[in-house]
Amino acid sequence: MQTKVIKLPSILAFLTLLTVILTGSHQAQAQCSCQSSAANGTLPWGAGIANMGALQIFEEDAIYLTVNVPEDTAPLTINGDPTISVGKTRYFVIRHLEPGRTYQFEIMAERANAAGVAMEEIKVIKVAAGSNRMLELNPIKRKGDPDARTVEGEEDNESPTD
């Protein structure tokens, strides 16, 4: 099935989304609602909408994150703020952003291994407003290990030597 992406002005997007909600053809998952704002360097998290069939609505002043983790209850933080969602797939919408501007997020998942040792994975990503992004986080490095953190754009780009 091919997914259609439609970018609409905020009011029209809201009305379309309201229609989808009222007709029951969606699944919604509530996320944490932080008391901070984009002005002080952190961003408010809103409700995520997922699995709306072939129609997905992307507002130009929002970022849509989908994060996959190996365990339903794995703690997940975004920019240091804990999220309250559970499940192997988590959906986040960050709204009221400057359209087209790129924002950076630090996303961390944690879990304990079979021996009870705390494990983590941290990814720092850059995403432009008006787009969506999917991440896979699998915490397999010990908590505090510098190798548990990857920063987008800082991958090792060594060229082969002759």
Image (tube, rainbow, N blue to C red):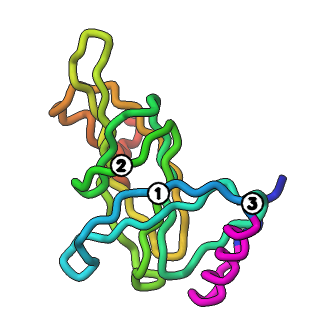
Quadrant location of the C terminus in the rendered image: top left
Q: Which residue is mark 1?
A: 30
Q: Is residue 137 visible?
A: yes
**41 to 134, vertically: above or below:** below
Region in magenta: 6-23
Q: What kind of secondary structure does the magenta stretch mostly adopt?
A: helix
- Determine the residue positioned at 52% across, 54% down: 29
Q: Nearer the viewer, residue 153 or 110?
A: 110
Could you tell me which secondary element the residue under label 2 belongs to? loop
Task: Find the residue positioned furthest to the top.
Answer: 115
Could you tell me which secondary element the residue under label 1 belongs to? loop
- Determine the residue positioned at 43% across, 67% down: 46
Marks 1 and 3, how far apart in space?
Answer: 17 Å
Task: Tell me the tag on residue 25.
Answer: 3
Q: Assess whether residue 16 is covered by the magenta stretch.
A: yes
Could you tell whether 42 is left or right of 135 in the image?
left
Could you tell whether 82 is left or right of 101 in the image?
left
- Determine the residue positioned at 57% across, 87% down: 10
Could you tell whether 14 is left or right of 94 in the image?
right
Task: Tell me the tag on residue 135.
Answer: none
Marks 2 and 1, how far apart in space?
Answer: 8 Å
